Image: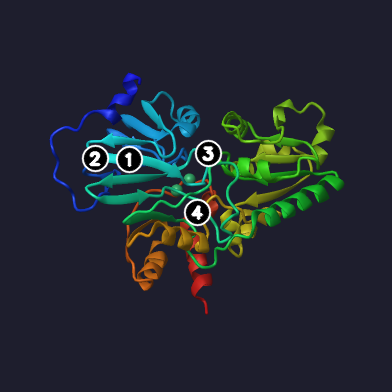
Amino acid sequence: MSASARPWTSAPSSPRAVAEDLIVQRPEGLYCPAGDFHIDPWRPVARAVITHAHADHARRGHGAYLATAISEGVLRSRLGPITLQGLAYGEAVLINGVRVSLHPAGHVLGSAQVRVEHAGQVWVASGDYFTSGHTHDTNTTCVPFEPVRCHCFITESTFGLPIYRWRPQAELMAEINAWWAANAAAGRASLLLGYSFGKAQRLLAGVDASIGPIVVHGAVEPLNEAYRAAGVALPPTLRLEAVKDKALLQRALVVAPPAVLGSAWARKLGEHSDAFASGWMQLRGARRRQGVDRGFVLSDHADWPGLQQAIAATGASRVIVTHGYEAVMVRWLQQQGLEAGSFRTEFGADDGEAPAMLAAPVAASEAADQSFAG
Ligand SMILES: [Zn+2]
Ligand SMILES: [Zn+2]
């Protein structure tokens, strides 16, 4: 064990007062008083347990990081030199007498829920997770979400409104393939926009690579390599800069982050159709506001039925809702007879599901309108 691992495995120091709640909210983020560590903190802290490598959950400046070993490569490439201990799923460490383990969240490569056990109490902080009403329709690019039994479940709620119900991924991929094939037949490129980490690889793993060549943006390929290194099968991909014969682009699927929309980079593709893959595409008007030809509803977050089933499967009698439609979800949970509340967090601002144009305030107001209009 390296010296860098010591902050996580040191013997318990002086006995601490057992806090009533295992995890509380602090200005710097979610905090476990008994173990003296934070979970996905947004301000610099001594010890941070990290659920996954998206920018709003994994930030710079913490003294020591604890995360899944699978996420180590992406975390290090995004955060630079950090003190990081990696855990296997289900492996436990004791932090000041608090037992901490990480469990699959099905969101992106290496994503985890944090299970915290102390003095007979078990709390689970979900981070972001993917599961849908189609229970067996899992995210195949990472270890699927596994419910963990607990007394209190801290859940995300990014798509916690009844309007969000994902269709089976196979149906969606068939739509994307048909769109790509039609563009290829017409001799134009298919620019498919999705976040570089997670969404892009899900798209790549799901498309039919026999339709044509697959070209990716330079921000996407390093993540592809991390997925391949973890044993996830992705079709061959080519950086745009490596495309010598421009005629090849006329049949190509081009996967790039949403930021390239309208950029000089996108103009290099010549004539093309563009599409955006995001859960927000379920909102009326989102595609039009984004200014793309097509919208595909593909999310790395749980839909409404997925959230409900995930929460029920924990057996928790108490639920704390974080980023998303907290009020709606809390009300629904209370109607089910559960003790429910919310934590105000700084998650979701840079979540990768939506570019700034579609970000929370606009989407939330529109979604709320749709949800409660009759
Ligand atoms: Zn995330
Ligand atoms: Zn998040």
Task: Say which amino acid is labelled 3.
Answer: Leu
Q: Is residue 249 left or right of residue 278?
A: right
The first of marks 1 and 2 along the sequence is: 2
Q: CA distance from mark 1 to mark 3?
A: 20 Å
Q: Nearer the viewer, mark 1 or mark 2?
A: 1
Q: Which badge, 1 or 3, is on the more N-terminal residue?
A: 1
Report if the CB atoms under discs 1 and 3 are less than 8 Å apart.
no
Q: Earlier in the sequence, mark 4 or mark 2?
A: 2
Q: Which residue is mark 3?
A: 109
Res. 35 mark: 2
> Quarter of the image containing the N terminus?
top left
Quarter of the view holding residue 50? top left
> Residue 373, image x and y in percent?
52, 76
Amino acid type indicated by mark 4: Ala
Q: Are marks 1 and 2 in contact (CB under 8 Å)?
A: yes
From the viewer's perspective, tell me whether residue 71 is left or right of residue 341. Answer: right
- For the residues carrying marks 4 and 2, which lies nearer the camera in this image? 2
Q: CA distance from mark 1 to mark 4?
A: 33 Å
| Separation of residues labelled 4 and 3 (CA atoms) | 24 Å
Q: Circles 1 and 4: CB distance less than 8 Å?
A: no
Residue sitting at x 65%, y 45%: 203
Image location (x, y in percent) of residue 255:
67, 40
**Disc 4 designates what residue?**
359
